[in-house]
Image (cartoon, grey):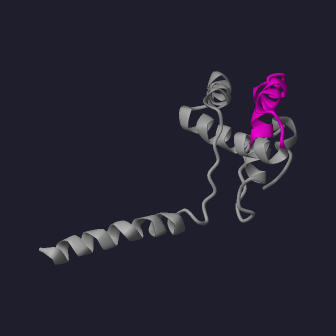
Amino acid sequence: MSSVNTIQETTDSQQFTRDLFDRFFTKTISYPSNRVDAVVGFFENRGFDKNAAISVASVLLEQSKIDNVNVLELLDKLQKFDGVKLNSIVTAILNNNRSKISKLGYRSEQQQNVIESRNIIY
């Protein structure tokens, strides 16, 4: 019976060390809840899906903390842009915070001039 108690005590004393080293390479970042809600709500109001709004908000909050910029001032500046320009800006921000081996983008349909293309032989 005493061997069971010894094992339990050993694991409890090692738990602090395990927790310390499990979190060693992860940095904790905290933001005020009102700012998180404001940023997520901003993107949801502009037609972003809930998950997309949360993803973009987390990147913006992190980048604003790194650059020492108030995220609410950034939202005021982003509010002036229409949907297409906002999507371009969000794509650029996300690409800057991604791995360099992949990029986000979108494809636009190429318009062919039908009058000119009828004379071209394929």
Residue 62 sits in quarter: top right
Residue 59 sits in quarter: top right
Residue at (62, 34) in percent of width and height: 53
Whether 80 is among the magenta residues is yes
Is residue 8 toward the left or the right of residue 39 in the image?
left
Is residue 57 toward the left or the right of residue 16 in the image?
right
Magenta region, main secondary structure? helix
Residue at (75, 44) in percent of width and height: 91
> Which segment did they paint magenta?
68-90
Depth order, front residue of 100/63: 63
In the image, residue 80 sits, relative to residue 63, either above or below, namely: above
Whether residue 5 is visible here, answered yes or no, is yes
Whether residue 106 is visible here, answered yes or no, is no
- Residue 82 on image: x %, y %: 80, 24
For the N terminus, the image quarter is bottom left
Residue at (88, 40) in percent of width and height: 116
Whether 82 is among the magenta residues is yes
In this view, the residue farthest toward the left is: 1
